[in-house]
Amino acid sequence: MANLFGEYVCKLDAKGRFMLPAGLKKQLPEADQERFVLNRGFEKNLTLYPDSEWQKITKEINSLNLYNKKNREFVRYFYRGASEVVCDGASRLLLPKTLAEYAGVDKQLVLFAYGNRIEIWSKELYEATMDAEPEEFSDLAEEVMGKINDNIM
């Protein structure tokens, strides 16, 4: 599993392409540096998965019981807009127009990498989201991380 991290501001060119930053690309195994799957994120953003990570996620999703209505709804919304994107010779990725419109990406975007994925945000929405940091981040950290086993570190 990838352990991606970092925050990168990128520009979208006139054709809707952006450069995959070298600092991010070097975090990926060589086999994952060219092919990705892009889909809608859980917020008003996009999620870019290295192909090998997408295969793991879809295997898990494909194991859901599709006789369950909530599972079917989740699958439909999760796969909605999913598109394969491939780096060109200049390490650029083409952002499909419908997905760019969904996320409100126009001229600048932010790549926010964590774990096995890279979120793509419009720069404005990303800044607004991050500016809404909880007043007591330490309380949030305790609530979310306080249940993790102490033996991990």
Image (cartoon, rainbow, N blue to C red):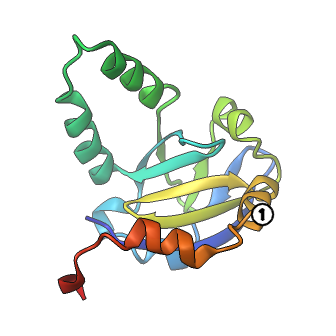
Q: Which residue lies furthest to the bottom in this view?
A: 153
With 90 as the anchor, is 83 left or right in this view? left
Q: Image quarter for residue 152?
A: bottom left
- Could you tell me which secondary element the residue under label 1 belongs to? helix
Q: Image quarter for residue 142?
A: bottom left
The three-letter code of the residue at mark 1 reads Glu
Query: How many discs appear?
Result: 1
Please name the residue shown 58% across and 71% down the image. Answer: 21
Q: Could you tell me if residue 5 is visible in this image?
A: no
Judge by depth and name the residue closer to the eye, 120 or 16: 120
Q: Could you tell me if residue 148 is visible in this image?
A: yes
With 91 as the anchor, is 149 left or right in this view? left
Residue 35 on image: x %, y %:
40, 51
Q: Classify 86 as above or below 81.
A: below
Residue 36 on image: x %, y %:
42, 49
- Give the position of the C terminus as an image quadrant: bottom left
Please name the residue shown 43% across and 31% down the image. Answer: 78
With 84 as the anchor, is 128 left or right in this view? right
Judge by depth and name the residue closer to the eye, 142 or 6: 142
Please name the residue shown 21% across and 26% down the image. Answer: 64
Tell me the crowding category of disc 1: few under 14, some 14 to 19, or many 20 or more residues within 10 angstroms, Cα based. Answer: few
Q: Image quarter for residue 104?
A: top right
Please name the residue shown 82% across and 56% down the image. Answer: 124
With 23 as the anchor, is 1 left or right in this view? left
Residue 25 on image: x %, y %:
47, 71
Residue bearing the label numbered 1: 127
- Give the position of the N terminus as an image quadrant: bottom left
